[in-house]
Amino acid sequence: MKKSIFILALGFVSLSLSAQKIAKTDPSIVAWANGVEVNRGTQSTTGENADKVVTYGKPYDAIGVAASDNLRCVSLGNGGSAIITFDRPIMNGAGYDFVVFENAFDESFLELAFVEVSSNGKDYFRFPSISTATQTDLAGSNYKNLAGVYDYNYGVGFDLDEITDNEKLDKSNIRFVRIVDVLTGVSKDSQGNVIYDAISENTYSAGFDLSGVAVINAGQPYVIADMEGLLTDANTFELPSFENYDEFIENENAFHKNYTSGGLVFPGVAVESYGYEFDFGWGLSNITDVETATATENSGTGYNNNYYASASLSGLEGEGKTYLQGYYSSYNTEEHLAVSKQDGNTFYPKGVYVCQSMASYNYPTTDPLESGWFKVVATGYDESGAVTGTSELYLIDFRTDTEGKVLGNRDDWRFLDLASLGQVSKVKFTLESNCVGEYGINIPTYLCIDNFVYSNDNKNAIAEVNDNNLNINIYPNPATEYVTISNVKDCMVRVTDLQGRMVYSNKADNDTIQINNLTSGTYIVSVVSNNNIATKKLIVK
């Protein structure tokens, strides 16, 4: 009897896995990852390469629509991981809620990964995985709820219903997906079985190769200030500096310039002190090589322009993309490194990607720190000027944590979660360190930011959106039995309640949907077509 049950279980796994197969061109996909933070693993688990991290690909190779080939991806390495963010929350709806893609050439060499989700960026919950594979049988049909079991044209779908409910996980507001490389012969599935996948050792591209993550069931899109279009020339930068010294006098020794993107204001300020010009706050950059940064540093174009030129050498979404650099000084009385709305209203910050500005001058490398740290702190303020909360991220930390790990010097883009700040009128950034001298922090206090994400309403507030001319009308409204939606044929239609719970999700083959199973109340109807979205309120009597 036990043997028969086991065989049936294997059959169930195969059938379930087959249903998880989703093409990267599937019309149900409404959005792709817009940010990735990678923690690289090693090239090998043993031997001389056990201490060498993988190098293939860049994190931004996993942003946006997965490539049509299998060359654009980022290798995680043995035991490596990646945290993915999106321009909208993932919601638990009908069927699969999101899809993970790997770059496998075919299904005979599979590199696998666990998949986890989080609402708050701190508590992650792993999908219950099953593996019946052996060292000699690595067929994709042996796995369930593990990413990487198909070739690069297809991804594995994940349904949030398969994760046990927990008070720390809001399935209507999934903001983070974490991918964790499976160590073959070491990692275990949710039932305690050892997982076997392809052995990829002693190579710079070892481990799971992430090529994209797509969203199927989604909430309202956030607003993103991505800085694109703010610089017209390539491989350059811009500061709020005066063109000549006389302008300092005319502007009472301080000149303000606002950079605007996505409805937000990022102010920069030029200040004259001791006969020199200092640039504080935000400036623009898209510099892509150390040579240009070094040349600019030595050009004498400004007293501290050299550090602005010492850029991250890449925006979050790739080389040549524009991002903001900022200089912080505790001595400057002019407000700087602040972010606020153009219209003066309050907003709900969700997060921003940050990076050191150390491309051509890396202090921890030239003067190693034994137990030093350097961090960015974001502080929210309400309309009265009261602090709403703080959030921080260590960019450098050579201390040993409780697990014996050292963060070290991170010079890549990392996500700073700002959701805990709540409703704010303004966010201000400061830089702190324990490496201080007579004149303050020894480490140059510069910072890069990109893709500042926020919403104008709290996560489940009612909002009506018409994006990219995708206009819809709903009638009758209020309704009891059915509603007719204009311009909806061949679009995905989703209905959520005011708690963000999906109550209807389907591809429309006509313009009428039944609502007689819905209780009385207010709902949000979303229509998605070719990554465009339109939403309307619906009242059910």
Image (tube, rainbow, N blue to C red):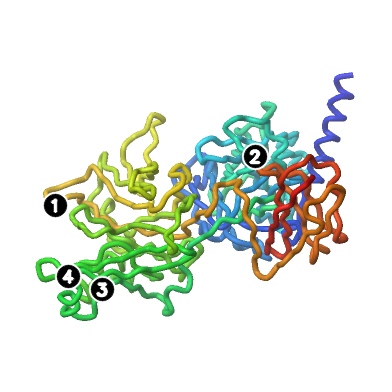
Q: Name the kind of residue labelled 4 in the image.
A: Asn
Residue ID for mark 3 = 241
Residue 362 image offset from top left, x and y in percent: 29, 57
Q: Name the kind of residue labelled 3 in the image.
A: Ser
Examine the rendered structure and indicate whether residue 171 appears above or below residue 525: above
Of the two numbered discs 3 and 1 in the rendering, the one whose residue sits closer to the viewer? 3
Would you say 192 lies left or right of 264 here? right
Q: Name the kind of residue labelled 1 in the image.
A: Tyr
Asked if marks 1 and 2 touch (Cβ < 8 Å), the reply is no
Would you say 162 lies left or right of 252 here? right
Residue ID for mark 1 = 439
Query: Which numbered tag is attached to residue 171?
Result: 2
Of the two numbered discs 3 and 4 in the rendering, the one whose residue sits closer to the viewer? 4
Q: Earlier in the sequence, mark 2 or mark 3?
A: 2
Residue at 41% in and 30% down: 403
For the residues marked 3 and 1, what is the alpha-carbon distance in whole angstroms?
24 Å
Res. 173 image quadrant = top right
Quadrant (top left/top right/bottom left/bottom right) for the C terminus: top right
Quadrant (top left/top right/bottom left/bottom right) for the N terminus: top right
For the residues marked 2 and 4, what is the alpha-carbon distance in whole angstroms?
52 Å
Residue ID for mark 4 = 253
Residue 297 image offset from top left, x and y in percent: 25, 71
Q: Name the kind of residue labelled 2 in the image.
A: Lys
Residue at 65% in and 56% down: 103
Residue at 26% in and 39% down: 371
Secondary structure of the residue carrying tag 3 is loop
**Pointer 2: residues within 10 angstroms few (<14), some, or many (20+)?**
many
Of the two numbered discs 1 and 4 in the rendering, the one whose residue sits closer to the viewer? 4
Secondary structure of the residue carrying tag 4 is loop
